[in-house]
Image (cartoon, rainbow, N blue to C red):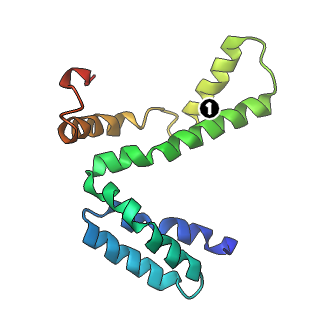
């Protein structure tokens, strides 16, 4: 895969993941495959062969989609922590290490205010409660 196509290929699947039903997802998938099939023919086979494992994801609400996809954000944060610690090398005490990690989190948002997941967590929690009522106790909502 050519490096110049990375950014475009990273954005193109988004319509597949943000639609509300399976038919719309299939249409978005087919449009993406039509666009890239001539240049990357293996992509079509990969998408079509794994489609049956992806379809159950579409049965959940958008809030649950965002929660499932947030694992990428968590992995990104862990990578930033590792990079910050590796760049520093060593710390004089535990407080210095925690301060480094705190500043890493604060630097993620352009405004310097951390906690952007707080805005999306409550709606997701409510959706989990409704969707999985038989497995999720209302008393667990915080």
**Residue, disc 1:** 104
16 horizontally vs 109: left or right: left
The residue lying furthest to the bottom in this view is 38
Identify the residue at image location x=32%, y=69%.
25
Identify the residue at image location x=66%, y=74%.
1
60 horizontally vs 35: left or right: left
In the rendered image, residue 138, in percent from the top left (x then y), is placed at 19, 25
| SS label for mark 1 | helix
The residue lying furthest to the right in this view is 89
Number of marks in picture: 1
51 horizontally vs 107: left or right: left
For the residue pair 52 and 65, the one nearer the viewer reads as 52
For the residue pair 125 and 60, the one nearer the viewer reads as 60
In the rendered image, residue 2, in percent from the top left (x then y), is placed at 68, 75
Identify the residue at image location x=78%, y=34%.
87
Neighbor class of circle 1 (other Cα within 10 Å; few <14, some 14-19, many 20+) is some
In the rendered image, residue 29, in percent from the top left (x then y), is placed at 40, 74
Say if 7 sits above or below 30 in the image.
Answer: above
Quarter of the image with the C terminus is top left
Residue 32 visible, this orientation: yes
Say if 78 sits above or below 94 in the image.
Answer: below
For the residue pair 113 and 141, the one nearer the viewer reads as 141
Say if 14 sits above or below 119 in the image.
Answer: below
Residue 108 visible, this orientation: no
In the rendered image, residue 59, in percent from the top left (x then y), is placed at 26, 55
Identify the residue at image location x=52%, y=84%.
37
């Amino acid at each position: 895969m050519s490096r110049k196509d990375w950014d475009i290929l990273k954005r193109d699947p988004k319509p597949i993941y943000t639609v509300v039903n399976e038919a719309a997802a299939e249409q978005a998938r087919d449009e993406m495959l039509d666009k890239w099939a001539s240049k990357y023919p293996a992509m079509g086979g990969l998408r079509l062969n794994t489609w049956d494992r992806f379809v159950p994801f579409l049965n959940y609400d958008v809030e649950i989609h965002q929660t499932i996809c947030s694992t990428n954000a968590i992995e990104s944060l862990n990578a930033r922590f590792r990079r910050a610690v590796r760049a520093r090398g060593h710390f004089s005490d535990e407080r210095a290490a925690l301060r480094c990690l705190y500043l890493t989190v604060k630097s993620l948002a352009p405004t310097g205010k951390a906690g952007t997941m707080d805005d999306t967590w409550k709606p997701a929690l409510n959706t989990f409660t409704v969707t999985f009522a038989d497995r999720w106790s209302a008393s667990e909502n915080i």
